[in-house]
Image (cartoon, rainbow, N blue to C red):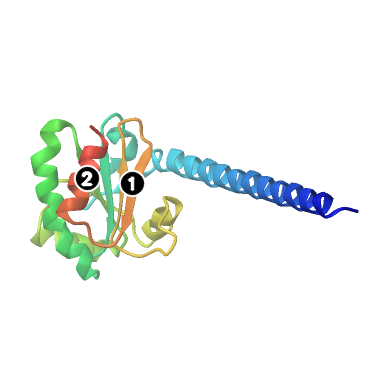
Amino acid sequence: MSAGGGSSRRRWLVAAVAGLAVAGGAGLAWRRRAGNSAAQAAFWQTQFKRSDDTLLTMTAFSGKPLLLNFWATWCPPCLDEIPLLEAFFNQNKIKGWQVVGLAADQDDSVKRFLARSPLAYPVGLAGYAGIELSRSLGNDGGGLPYTVLFDAAGEMLRHKIGRLTEDDLAAWARALH
């Protein structure tokens, strides 16, 4: 066998392995996207009790951009970003933006917090199941705060674990224009 034939076989083998890796990666990405799409579809069908015992139904927020924030009263970075979310909501609701907080906490703690510090945007009482919901939306570690941006079609565009900044919100707003 000549040296050139071995080199040709190696190139073929490398190309074949690379092709399988790309196909496998594409398949994995498709499965993750399909799973994420299923989680997103399920999210839009959920509803949560509010502090006044009315229901917060997620379908009511379809058709406009939505900033969804998972938080808890025991989470200092969550509490630190609430004024930023409140300001963003107040400045952008006229433009069709929506903000929803989902409290992954004990109902009584959230009710006490909201009685002391009412928010302009709606808050759902997700309880500790809110952490699992956030995981289904890409929060693999289950940490808080966790924020997700949905476009008007209900597709998840961005997400962030940790405290949001004004720069984050400005960049996310630009992503929709």
Along the line of sight, which residue is nearer the eye, 49 or 46? 46
Residue carrying label 1: 158
- Which amino acid, mark 1? Arg
Q: Position of residue 104 (x, y in %)?
A: 32, 60
Q: Position of residue 142 (x, y in %)?
A: 40, 63
Residue carrying label 2: 171
Placement of 129 over or under 28, stated as above or below: below
Placement of 47 over or under 136, stated as above or below: above
Q: Identify which residue is drawn at 56% across, 42% down.
A: 30
Q: Position of residue 124 (x, y in %)?
A: 27, 50
Placement of 74 over or under 86, stated as above or below: below
Along the line of sight, which residue is nearer the eye, 168 or 9? 9
Residue 30 visible in the shown view: yes
Dot 2 crowding, Cα within 10 Å, few <14, some 14–19, many 20+ = few
Q: Identify which residue is drawn at 70% across, 47% down.
A: 15
Along the line of sight, which residue is nearer the eye, 21 or 32? 21
Residue 120 visible in the shown view: no
